[in-house]
Image (cartoon, rainbow, N blue to C red):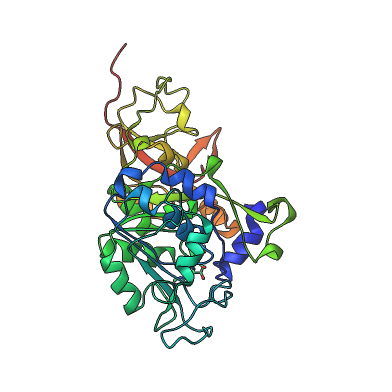
């Protein structure tokens, strides 16, 4: 937590300018190629000149067989309007205040082979087919941006973290396929967790170790250990999607067996506590509490998600309040601002609250000496 203090500060200040690297987009998109043929893709938090999402889809437009690509940018983005080659419909140089849109249905290749950066630049700066000024700011919630959303099949971007809940709610409302970047904390938001529990959204392939490196103007917010070659290191970064991918069907191999001596049972809920996903017992039939990083390995054919054990979400699935004699421990945890766990165990007579837990059940536990 302490390490990311600077970035939490950036988040609190609604500083949303973290630009995604091309290589991270490429690495994730490799897992979904088959979804894109004949589709309209929308990147709705993306400056066509700057965003690597736009660049990726322009370069791969023909390869993926896209029907159409729409990118819209937001006027408050610090990179918008820095290029002088953007014109409005009256051929006047762009003035900050409006967002921009690029809406294309073909990407010509000058040399007939790959799409070069010159091809892309020529296309973007073409007065006829290139980047145009929007009527408004380019807010993804605005009427004109929603009109583009309605025309899209798949939305792919790294949206503003400060508006993540709203952003996802809009995608769900308009029943879009999506692949977006978010923070691990978002899993614990009630609305987001419900979507994950109901298998309406899941984690993508992911960043290595859930760590991402982003270009950002907030160098001052980050402590020196978070800098790397001009980029800021952000931990707990994940891809969220509702498009199927291979990883979601991989069965986790479990090695351990349940023994009451090796697993604690919660004091206020009928479930066992498992501290590491790799410690999940293969033969336990009841509910188990695991760290939320379990969701990285979640296969809905193998496990069922029952609920979440923090910030009173546990109540929804029957987690009881702390016993009267233990209530003061919870108050103390809340005061410290530590993770507000609904579940607790007793270790040698001491109340112990594990970090955030997802409650799950194995759909096919091994029986007897299998
Ligand atoms: C995390 S950054 C990512 C930018 C880009 N998608 C990328 O991955 O490089 C989020 C972007 O969303 C923009 N943004 C903030 N509020 C927005 C809104 N209401 N509508 C659309 N974009 C917004 C920010 O200006 C910022 O550029």
Nearest the viewer among 320 and 280 is: 280
Which x, y percent locates residue 188? 43, 53
- Position of 65 relative to 71 (above/below): above
Quarter of the rendering containing residue 258? top left
Is residue 49 left or right of 283 when viewed as pictured? right
* Residue in the picture at 39% in, 23% down: 253
Q: Is residue 273 above or below residue 59?
A: above
Could you tell me residue 229's position as x and y percent? Answer: 70, 52
**Residue 101 lies in quadrant:** bottom left
Residue 301: image x %, image y %? 27, 33
Q: Does residue 203 appear anywhere in the picture?
A: yes
Observer-nearest of 370 and 139: 139
Task: Name the foreground residue: 72 vs 265.
Answer: 72
Number of marks drawn: 0
Q: Quadrant of the C terminus?
A: top left
Residue pictured at 25% horizontal, 60% vertical: 175
- Residue 360 in the image: above or below residue 41: above
Q: Residue at x 59, y 75 (%)?
A: 82
Q: Work out which residue is located at the far right of the displayed protein and give it.
A: 224
In the rendered structure, the answer to whether residue 8 lies left or right of residue 207 reads right
The single residue placed furthest to the top in the displayed view is 369
- 259 up-or-down from 339: above or below: above
Image quadrant of residue 269?
top left
Q: Position of residue 8 (x, y in %)?
A: 60, 61
Is residue 269 visible in the rendered structure shown here? no
């Amino acid at each position: 937590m302490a390490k990311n203090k600077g970035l939490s500060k950036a988040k609190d200040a609604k500083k949303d300018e973290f630009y995604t690297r091309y290589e991270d987009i490429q690495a994730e998109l490799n897992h979904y190629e088959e979804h894109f043929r004949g589709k309209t893709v929308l990147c709705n938090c993306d400056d066509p000149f700057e965003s690597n999402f736009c660049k990726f889809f322009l370069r791969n437009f023909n390869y993926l067989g896209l029907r159409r690509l729409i990118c819209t940018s937001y006027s408050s983005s610090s990179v918008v309007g820095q290029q002088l080659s953007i014109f409005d419909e009256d051929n006047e140089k762009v003035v900050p205040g409006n967002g921009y849109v690029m809406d294309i249905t073909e990407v010509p290749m000058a040399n007939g082979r790959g799409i070069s950066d010159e091809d892309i630049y020529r296309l973007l700066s073409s007065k006829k087919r290139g980047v145009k000024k929007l009527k408004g700011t380019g807010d993804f919630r605005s009427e004109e941006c929603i009109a583009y959303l309605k025309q899209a099949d798949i939305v792919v971007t790294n949206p503003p973290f400060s508006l993540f809940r709203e952003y996802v709610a809009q995608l769900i409302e308009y029943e879009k396929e999506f692949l977006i970047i978010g923070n691990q904390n978002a899993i614990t938001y009630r609305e987001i967790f419900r979507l994950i529990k109901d298998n309406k959204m899941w984690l993508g392939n992911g960043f290595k170790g859930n760590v991402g490196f982003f270009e950002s103007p907030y160098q001052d917010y980050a402590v020196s250990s978070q800098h790397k070659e001009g980029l800021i290191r952000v931990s707990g970064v994940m891809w969220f999607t509702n498009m199927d991918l291979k990883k979601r069907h991989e069965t986790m191999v479990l090695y351990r067996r349940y023994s009451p001596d090796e697993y604690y049972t919660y004091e206020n809920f009928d479930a066992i506590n498992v501290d590491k996903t790799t410690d999940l017992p293969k033969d336990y039939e009841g509910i188990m509490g695991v760290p939320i990083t379990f969701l990285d390995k979640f296969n809905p054919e193998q496990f069922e998600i029952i609920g979440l054990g923090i910030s009173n979400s546990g109540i929804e699935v029957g987690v009881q309040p702390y016993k009267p004699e233990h209530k003061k421990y919870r108050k103390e945890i809340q005061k410290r601002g530590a993770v507000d766990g609904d579940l607790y165990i007793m270790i040698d007579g001491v109340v112990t609250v594990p970090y955030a837990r997802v409650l799950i059940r194995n759909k096919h536990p091994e029986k007897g000496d299998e």
